[in-house]
Structure formats: C-alpha cells, structure tokens
Amino acid sequence: MSQENVEFIQRGFEQYFATGELPWDIYDEGVEVYDHDTPDQGAYVGHTGLRRWLEDWGAAWADWSMEAERYIDAGDPVVSSFS
C-alpha cells in the first residue's frame, strides 16, 4: 500500500507542476508543510495551511519553481522533499 501512496502523491504534484493547481481532493485535511527556509513559521496545517504556504512562498519571489527531489515511503504517510 505505501508504494501506492508514493505514486498517488507523485501524481498530485505532477498535476500541480503542470497546471499550477493542486488536486485538493487527494490531500488529507491533516496535511502538514514544514518549510526549512522559515522554521519560525511552524507547520502549515490542512488545506488552508497548504494554500497559505503556497501564497506566502509565491509572494516572496518574482519567479520561482520547485522540483521534487524524492518521495519517502514512511509507511502510510509519504514524506517529500523539494528543491
């Protein structure tokens, strides 16, 4: 099941990279984003937090992109890192 989870998350990010819109229906409301560039911010939690992180990140840069470095099978959850 965990490899299926990794592939599921990969497809979601691929859609985001291609369209600029996340497929919200595949992201759990408990999703958490930790940005190592802003550690004092704490976690961005849930769909609202993920939207806020994307807005905060986008507002800080005139032009930006991200690329998935790896997806980590952590059992049921999937951990992903980006550059």
Image: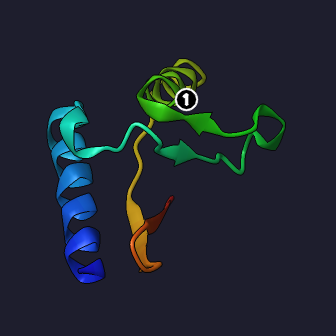
Q: Between residues 52 and 28, which one lies in front from this camera angle?
A: 28
Q: Does residue 42 appear to the left or right of 35 in the view shown?
A: right
Return the x and y of residue 53 as percentages of the image width and height. 54, 29
Q: Does residue 22 appear to the left or right of 55 in the view shown?
A: left
Question: Can you tell which quarter of the image residue 60 is in?
Answer: top right
* Residue at the image point whose x is 56% and y is 35% from the top: 45
User: Dot 1 lies on which element?
Assistant: helix
Q: Between residues 24 and 36, which one lies in front from this camera angle?
A: 24
* Residue at the image point whose x is 54% and y is 18% from the top: 59
Q: Mark 1 sits on what residue?
A: 57
Return the x and y of residue 20 as percentages of the image width and height. 23, 32
* Residue at the image point whose x is 39% and y is 72% from the top: 76
Say if 70 sits above or below 9 in the image.
below
Say if 80 sits above or below 43 in the image.
below
Return the x and y of residue 6 as percentages of the image width and height. 28, 72
Say if 8 sits above or below 4 in the image.
above
Quadrant location of the N terminus? bottom left
Name the colour scheme. rainbow
Q: Between residues 45 and 12, which one lies in front from this camera angle?
A: 45
Q: What residue type is labelled 1?
A: Trp
Return the x and y of residue 7 as percentages of the image width and height. 20, 70
- Disc 1: CA contacts within 10 A as few (<14), some (14-19) or many (>=20): some
Question: Can you tell which quarter of the image residue 65 is in?
Answer: top left
- Total residue callouts: 1
Q: Which residue occupies the extreme right position in the image?
A: 40
